[in-house]
Amino acid sequence: MHDYDSICSHLEKNKYKWLITGVAGFIGSNILNKLLKLNQTVIGMDNFSTGKRKNLDDVLSANENNESTNDFFLIEGDILDYELCQNATNGVDFVLHQAALGSIPRSIANPIATHNANVNGFMNIIMASKENSVKRFVYASSSSVYGDHPDLPKKEDKIGKPLNPYAITKLINEIYAHNFSQVYGYKSIGLRYFNVFGYRQDPNGAYAAVIPKWINASIKNEEIFINGDGKTSRDFCFVDNAVQINILSALTENHEALDQIYNVALDNQTSLIELYNLIRNNINTGLKDPIYKDFREGDIRHSRADISKAKLLLGYNPLVEVEEGIKKTTNWYFDRIEK
């Protein structure tokens, strides 16, 4: 079982028990949707500090004709509660740890809250997973770990100094995960997400990601703001690709793939102005020209991932490119955003 289709076929015939932390969040809810379609048993854990109940409602309504919705169990609670983490991981085959306080600006504004959730919470859930002999622990890291390292594309073994508290917390996660492998023999897999976008990503709030924020503004014909000169670029990655690599990581039988970190991206670069034009091409309204603002504190200028390691060791094969992903995402929001 190396390719994604084979693994999905295997899951359709074999039921496992999964724990998704941060299940009501953007990526967590998309993973939940896929696992329910594959008839898996899923325990979801969320404290709803950033996750949305409407995300779970949306997933469950989309799967209402699927009997697997009866195999979804929600734990409303915090990963800072170690006893709760112990109970949640008991009897679980795979843990997909997505819970975190995201956003670089949020971490700069409140580094203590970011540290507590992302470091102390991580320690609780990986320790509980080890103690309960969970078969595979897969966790969300971030491309922000690369910090000030100048090389493009980014390769997993070359990182610089982190540029903000959020990046520091994700680097600490990776260090702890590797240490658990060395000290306890408990091997995990870390996923460095690069600007993941797609269904159910929150378009509102001070820390909303750029794509849902711009789509929301475009549909409502509101002003769009670009931080910097528009030439800043990112390796935008549609959420289905992130779901794929989580499942591949959990089910991999390649021992060389364990105790490793992987980039989750497309090995591509899209500038902010190119992104704006992609969104504009998918919105049938006359958009206003973007308004340029100062560069955002803590941001890097360019980012691009080398995904050859994930392809080689996990069989990762991103199936949705940026343009198609923007079209899918725009269509999804267009039916849901109040004009």
Image (spheres, helix red, strand yellow):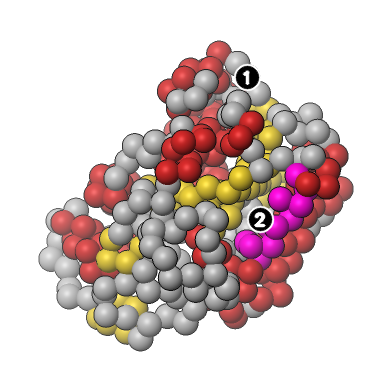
Residue at the image point whose x is 41% and y is 55% from the top: 305
Q: Give 113 or 272, whichever is nearer the viewer.
A: 272
Q: Give 337 or 122, whichever is nearer the viewer.
A: 122
Q: What residue type is labelled 2?
A: Glu
Front of the two marks 1 and 2: 2
Query: Can you see residue 294?
Result: yes
Q: Give 201 or 260, whichever is nearer the viewer.
A: 260
Q: In this view, does 137 lie to the left or right of 84?
A: left
Mark with earlier residue (1, 2): 1
103 up-or-down from 54: above or below: below
Residue 105 included in the magenta stretch of the image = no
278 up-or-down from 11: above or below: below
Q: How crowded is mark 2: few (under 14 residues within 10 Å), some or many (20 or more)?
A: many
Provide the major secondary structure of the magenta segment.
Answer: helix
Q: Is residue 132 left or right of residue 304?
A: right
Report helix, strand or loop for mark 2.
helix
**Percent from the top left, x then y, of residue 307?**
42, 47
162 up-or-down from 53: above or below: below
Q: Which amino acid does label 1 sit on?
A: Lys
**Percent from the top left, x then y, of residue 15?**
63, 19
**Percent from the top left, x then y, of residue 155?**
47, 55
Q: Distance between the residues labelled 1 and 2?
A: 29 Å
**Percent from the top left, x then y, of residue 276?**
23, 65
Q: Residue 107 carries which label?
A: none
Q: Name the residue under label 1.
A: 15
Report helix, strand or loop for mark 1.
loop
Q: Is residue 228 left or right of residue 239?
A: left
Q: Name the residue under label 2.
A: 174
Q: Residues within 10 Å of mark 1 (few under 14, many from 20)?
A: few
* Magenta-drawn segment: 169-181
Which image quadrant for residue 268? bottom left
